[in-house]
Image (tube, rainbow, N blue to C red):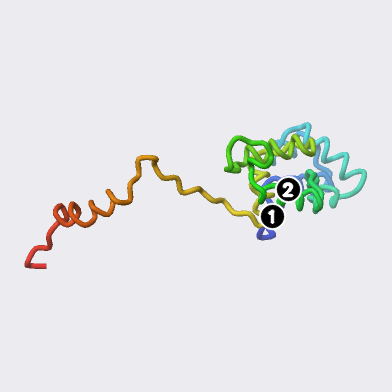
Amino acid sequence: MSTPHGRISRQAAVRLQAGELILRGFDDDEIVEILGCSLSSLRRWRAKVERDGLYALARKSGSGRFAELTPNQRDELKTIILQGAKASGYATERWTSRIVADLIRKKWGIEYCLSNVRKILCDLGLSFQKPDVKSTKHSQVAVDHWRKHEWPRIKKKRSVSE
């Protein structure tokens, strides 16, 4: 597997080294001992190399699971999110990755893990936001009184030598 910087991973390097050793005529036991890979993997790699050559062991670009939400579904998801969670039948107005994953599963029948939901939200241009929740006991009058009268009284005084 390639890294974002273009270097190959250790797994890819071992695969390619195994392919070179296969082409040089080493037997399976020798390669397993040299590289420390499993015999079952080596046998799979040998079959690929013998059938398609060394390049068959290189990572294919775009390998992996396909994105399942279509661009239209993503646009619809963004519209739904911007309308609010309560409009979609959820008890709270706060969207969480778990709630968005539930929405995607219910609406389109597609399962996503929470980290992929966060990636989708980021791709849609939506950012993480934490609501500013104030206590029901909060009183701005009491805060202002404390700042004006109590804070100056308890604030550490600067010493003359400073």
Query: What residue occupies the far left of the structure in this picture?
Result: 160
Q: Which residue is mark 2?
A: 77
Residue 62 vs residue 47, the one in the foreground: 62
Quadrant housing the C terminus: bottom left
- Of tags 1 and 2, which is closer to the observer? 2
- At 63% from the left edge and 54% from the top edge, which residue is drawn? 126
Image x and y of residue 99, in percent = 64, 38
Q: Quarter-wise, where is residue 115 in the image?
A: top right
Image x and y of residue 15, in percent = 75, 45
Image x and y of residue 118, in percent = 64, 47
Helix, strand or loop for disc 2: helix
Image x and y of residue 65, in percent = 78, 43
Q: Give, as a three-letter code, the residue at label 2.
A: Leu
Tags 1 and 2 in contact by the CB under 8 Å rule?
A: yes
Query: Mark 1 or mark 2, which has the lower sequence index?
Result: 2
- Res 140 label: none
Q: Quarter-wise, where is residue 28 in the image?
A: top right
- At 87% from the left edge and 42% from the top edge, which residue is drawn? 48
- At 90% from the left edge and 43% from the top edge, which residue is drawn? 50
Q: Which residue is mark 1?
A: 124
Answer above or below: position of 27 versus 154.
above
Mark 2: give few (<14), some (14-19) or many (20+) Cα within 10 Å: many
- At 76% from the left edge and 32% from the top edge, which residue is drawn? 39
Mark 1: give few (<14), some (14-19) or many (20+) Cα within 10 Å: few
In the rendered picture of this protein, how many numbered marks are placed on residues? Answer: 2
Mark 1–mark 2 distance (CA, rounded to whole Å):
9 Å
Q: Give, as a three-letter code, the residue at label 1.
A: Leu
Helix, strand or loop for disc 1: loop
Residue 47 vs residue 30, the one in the foreground: 47
Residue 28 vs residue 114, the one in the foreground: 114
